[in-house]
Image (cartoon, helix red, strand yellow):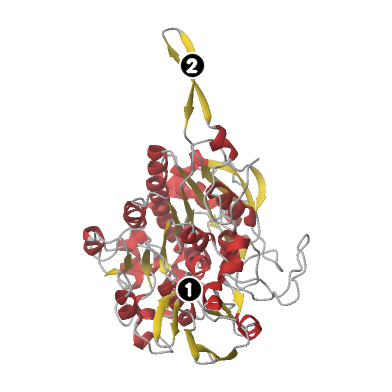
């Protein structure tokens, strides 16, 4: 009888029984055992990638995507209390196996009103729950996160931090810095510096103090030989791939390659999350050029992961978006009467003329934006701007140029949009497993997490109980005095004094520091600490 021992890695039934292959030796069929134990999982998330986005990118590329060979099912994307999900709860579902509420990162919702959802138990609202990354770490695996957004943005934070407000970058990034993640690559450097933080802390110095090789250039990334690597390549988000300066920012594929190289040195395996963040941002702006740019960049990262998995035969690859966005359609109101006679070129040729995204285009305009027609002609191939379109571009707020020019190029390419927000339809699930153990049919976004944890032999409920103990009740049950503010928990009993800095994995008992296996979490209401911290106070 098979038994599951907490969070320790265990072989799946398929791996224990092995895959039997028939070979011929001297004319005799022989059964040969093939070890298909899964040690690694790589999940790649193209945030906000609607189904038509992949079709558009495929036509633009002129050949199949790597993703095409991996399609295995569909995923429902709703959150706990809404049919259309925000990225924070959508990513939380992938990371933790629990649905949540808009803006909530790595914590349970305070209400669950969608059909089929169970009510939230008393006392569980906003309670932190373990992610697959945290469980992998406790199982001895190496872990990593990559994003083209700020690294403390919703999706990467879902796997590495816990707080019911995705905008609280101070709380999220502090947890990320102290949560023992081996590889962190992306943007958001300004939110690690004192000037970019409300708490004024120098998080870069703290990251370096923990032994990370902190790099800021592609060359630094390439040359690093450290097993702990933090790459921060932009003050905020990275550029769209079409706009990217390769001397200043690595591609998503390059970051994925480096992360796998570092993480794969661990014999116990690894977990890696890779996000193509700005597919979503382009969709919000109804900017098809930005979408194509970053879908194709994302697909190159998928190829890196898939090639590694096929070569090593011990890695599962999952690629799935968290939700649709924009309601993108190949075809618009202008093709209502001739949709079946509209040639492919009428969709693709206007897009092929674009040499930059709307975001990249902004830097080409002069201060008074008097060169709009020249710039649009040079970089977008558009020579017939209307007066209204010129005014739209001229009046666009700084940092929002893709919102101005996205609809302009969409009209010329017969690309339709229904919204500037997220959409609630099912999305495509892409998977690869060397043993053929892949989910199929229409599944829930929480089932993606359940699949990944199953193949790695992880038990997230057990990990949650180890990492997130309600602190006040647990310490007071030991007869200790508990006090706390948003910076530190202080526990005293007799001559013992225990200090636990909030959002860090440090415990100071009577002046002596030790490292906990998880971070201290404050969810705005209550404090949660690893069981290790509770055990430091004797009864």
Q: Specify whether residue 86 is in view.
A: no
Place of residue 298 in the rendered image (x, y in percent of width and height, measured from the top left): 42, 53
Viewer-nearest of discs 2 and 1: 2
Total marks drawn? 2
**Numbered circle sitting on residue 170:** none
Place of residue 70 in the rendered image (x, y in percent of width and height, measured from the top left): 51, 41
Image height of 137 relative to 432, above or below: below
Q: Quadrant of residue 396?
A: bottom left
Place of residue 324 in the rendered image (x, y in percent of width and height, measured from the top left): 58, 59
Q: Specify whether residue 177 is in view.
A: yes
Residue to which mark 1 is pinned: 388
Residue at image coords 65%, 68%: 100
Residue at image coords 55%, 56%: 7
Local crowd at mark 2 within 10 Å, few (<14), some, or many (≥20)?
few
Relative horizontal placement of residue 282, taking residue 227 as reference (left or right): right
Image height of 524 relative to 385, above or below: below
Image height of 279 relative to 390, above or below: above
Position of the C terminus by quadrant: bottom right
Mark 1 lies on a secondary structure that is helix
39 or 108: which is nearer to us? 39
Mark 2 lies on a secondary structure that is strand
**Numbered circle sitting on residue 30:** 2
In the rendered structure, which disc, 2 or 1, sits on the residue that comes first in sequence? 2
Position of the N terminus by quadrant: top right
């Amino acid at each position: 009888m098979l038994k599951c021992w907490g969070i320790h890695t265990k072989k799946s039934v398929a791996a224990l029984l092995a895959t039997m292959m028939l070979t011929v030796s001297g004319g005799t069929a022989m059964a040969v055992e093939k070890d298909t134990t899964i040690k690694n999982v790589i999940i790649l998330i193209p945030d906000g990638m609607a189904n038509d986005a992949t079709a558009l990118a495929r036509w633009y590329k002129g050949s199949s995507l790597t993703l095409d060979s991996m399609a295995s099912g569909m995923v429902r994307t709703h959150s706990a209390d809404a049919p259309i999900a925000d990225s924070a709860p959508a990513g939380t579902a992938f990371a933790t196996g629990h649905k949540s509420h808009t803006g909530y990162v790595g914590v349970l919702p305070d209400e669950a009103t969608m059909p089929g959802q169970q009510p939230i138990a008393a006392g569980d609202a906003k309670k932190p729950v373990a992610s697959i990354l945290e469980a992998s770490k406790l199982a001895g695996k190496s872990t990593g996160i990559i994003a083209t957004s700020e690294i403390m943005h919703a999706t990467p934070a879902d796997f590495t931090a816990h707080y019911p407000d995705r905008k609280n970058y101070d709380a999220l990034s502090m947890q990320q810095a102290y949560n023992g993640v081996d590889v962190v690559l992306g943007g958001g450097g300004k939110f690690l510096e004192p000037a970019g933080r409300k708490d004024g802390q120098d998080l870069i110095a703290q990251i370096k103090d923990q032994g990370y090789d902190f790099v800021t250039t592609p060359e630094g990334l390439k040359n690093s030989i450290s097993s702990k690597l933090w790459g921060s390549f932009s003050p905020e988000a990275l550029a769209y791939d079409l706009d990217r300066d390769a001397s200043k920012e690595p591609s998503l594929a390059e970051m994925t390659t480096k992360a796998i190289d570092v993480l794969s040195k661990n014999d116990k395996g690894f977990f890696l999350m890779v996000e193509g963040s700005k597919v979503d941002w382009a969709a919000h702006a109804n900017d098809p050029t930005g979408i194509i740019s970053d879908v194709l960049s994302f697909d190159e990262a998928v190829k890196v992961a898939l090639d590694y998995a096929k070569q090593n035969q011990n890695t599962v690859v999952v690629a799935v978006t968290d939700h649709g966005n924009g309601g993108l359609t190949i075809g618009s109101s202008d093709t209502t009467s001739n949709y079946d006679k509209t040639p492919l070129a009428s969709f693709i040729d206007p897009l092929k003329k674009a040499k930059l995204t709307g975001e990249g285009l902004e830097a080409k305009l002069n201060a008074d934006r008097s060169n709009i027609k020249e710039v649009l002609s040079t970089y977008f191939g558009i020579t017939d701007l209307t007066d209204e379109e010129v005014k739209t571009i001229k009046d666009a707020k700084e940092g929002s140029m893709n919102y101005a020019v996205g609809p302009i190029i969409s009209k010329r390419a017969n690309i339709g949009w229904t919204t500037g927000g997220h959409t609630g339809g099912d999305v495509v699930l892409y998977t690869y497993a060397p043993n053929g153990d892949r989910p199929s049919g229409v599944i829930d976004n929480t089932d993606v997490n359940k699949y990944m944890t199953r193949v790695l032999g992880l038990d997230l409920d057990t990990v949650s109980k180890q990492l997130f103990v309600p602190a006040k009740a647990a310490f007071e049950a030991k007869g200790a005095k508990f006090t706390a503010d948003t910076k530190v928990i202080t526990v005293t009993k007799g001559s013992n004094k225990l200090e636990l800095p909030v959002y860090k994995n440090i415990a100071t008992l009577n002046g002596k520091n030790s490292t906990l296996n998880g971070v201290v979490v404050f969810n705005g209401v209550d404090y949660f600490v690893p069981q290790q911290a509770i055990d430091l106070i004797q009864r």
